Image (tube, rainbow, N blue to C red):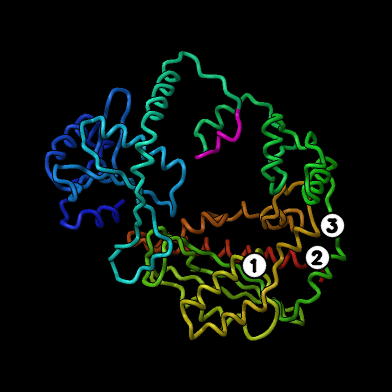
Amino acid sequence: GDIAIDIYDPDNLRQVLDPFTEGWAPAIAKTQEWIKDKHPIFEGTFAIDGALALADVLKVDESKRSKHWHMVEVKSSTSVKEVHLEDTAFQYFVVSRSGVKLSGVSLACIDSRWTYTTEGDYRGLLKEHDLTEQARALQDDVEVWLAEAHKVARKHKEPELEMGNHCNSPYECEFKAYCAKDIEQAEFPVEWLPRRSARLKEFIEENGITEMHDVPDDLLNDKQVLVKECTIDNEYFLDEKGAQEALSGCRYPLYFLDFETINFGVPQWIGSRPYQQIPFQYSLHKISANGTTTHREFLDLSGNDPCLAFATQLIKDCGKRGSILVYNQAFEKKRIEELAQRFPYLADELQALNARVVDLLPVCQKYYYHPEQQGSWSIKKVLPNMAPELNYAELEGVQHGGAAMEAFAEAIHPQTSDKRRLELDSQLREYCKLDTWAMVKIWEFFVHE
């Protein structure tokens, strides 16, 4: 939002409304006063009978002889979605019926291909998509939506509606827990079936199926049948020989590697793009041929771009030979490839690391399943039955990747105290270290060394 104001308000007039602080009536009145002028308005507040709308940006359309406004809705997504069309159509309906002459409406999305090249200059971050034609075509529909919404709101009793896909699309409904409280929970939910096809989802929805055992096997692939059988029979599956053969090509020293990254919508460092995964931390456990285990790590909480130091130390810590084991190689290999593109003089050494990568995830997916995984092969689901002594829940603060991102963002914030930054530093190191130690335990589980 702040970046949008900078882009659309080059004269720094800052006509920004905050109805949540000012109150709705004062914000509406101030919007009507500002409309008389020609300066950009942000969060313009409009109300008609039974509908309220906040326009992210209103700017005068200089191409028109008489004064018309162009409305811009700003979204943090990187593309136009169907829900955005409905949103802009609703905004257009309310604003135009409030007496504002609109020449059109656009949706400004983040351009993920744009690169941040000049400090403080975010021109190009947002890319406008003209949705005027689509918004106008939906005006009659908006009137119907409003009528239906008010009809529901006037009811004295909540409408009866079964839960389904609409509870999560286009966004997760805030009333899910409320609606589910009286529903008998499935013993073996169909949601545990991995990678459900469109055909399978349609069958489940149409027949109101909640229990896995009610899904015919002929609608399932081999992996889904395995999950179903192991879950219902409460038995685990292990192809020990297959797993050992899959890992037989690993060469000592063995390196167990895991990255933590941050993906800012608004790039923080020169040379980075919106939502680019920026690696700021890694953990590396090394097992030598004689069985000796050592640990190396990297973490940069300085607030500076961590990428060059990350890449340089990674090359050093991984040495020249030996297999590098990861969990879901697509993630780490992609980050290494991006580092090679940013720092061409390190490209050969970084790409040499990628050539040594071995992925533990497909080994687990193909040769192991425990019913307590509930259809998932994430490392946090696989680990408890292979190494029950390790428990992410016992970690302080940071217990998952999302929390690691939040901890990093807090740690590099200039207002974070030194004491708090040290706490976050310790939490991040312990979390990432457990990720790679977990991989060591998974590898040991399969090879019994």
Question: In terms of depth relative to the viewer, which is nearer, 442 or 53?
Answer: 53
Residue farthest toward the top in the current orientation of the protein: 156
The part of the chain drawn in magenta is: 163-171
> CB atoms at circles 3 and 1 under 8 Å apart?
no
Residue 129 location in percent, x, y?
36, 51
Mark 2 sits on what residue? 446
> Label 3 amino acid?
Leu
Question: In terms of depth relative to the viewer, which is nearer, 299 or 427?
Answer: 299
Determine whether 195 is above or below 202 in the image.
Answer: below
Q: Main secondary structure of the magenta part?
A: loop
**Dot 3 or dot 2, earlier in sequence:** 3
Mark 1 sits on what residue? 329
Residue 238: image tag: 3
Determine whether 239 is above or below 308 in the image.
Answer: above
Q: Would residue 396 be found to the left or right of residue 421 on screen?
A: right
Q: Could you give the CA–CA distance between mark 3 and mark 1, rounded to whole angstroms?
A: 22 Å
Question: At 15% across and 56% down in the image, what residue appears?
Answer: 11
Q: Nearer the viewer, mark 3 or mark 1?
A: 1
Q: Quadrant of residue 160?
A: top right
Q: Residues within 10 Å of mark 1 (few under 14, many from 20)?
A: many
Residue 18 location in percent, x, y?
25, 40
Instruction: Pick the quarter of the image with the C terminus.
Output: bottom right
Q: Residues within 10 Å of mark 2 (few under 14, many from 20)?
A: many
Residue 449: image tag: none
> Label 2 amino acid?
Phe
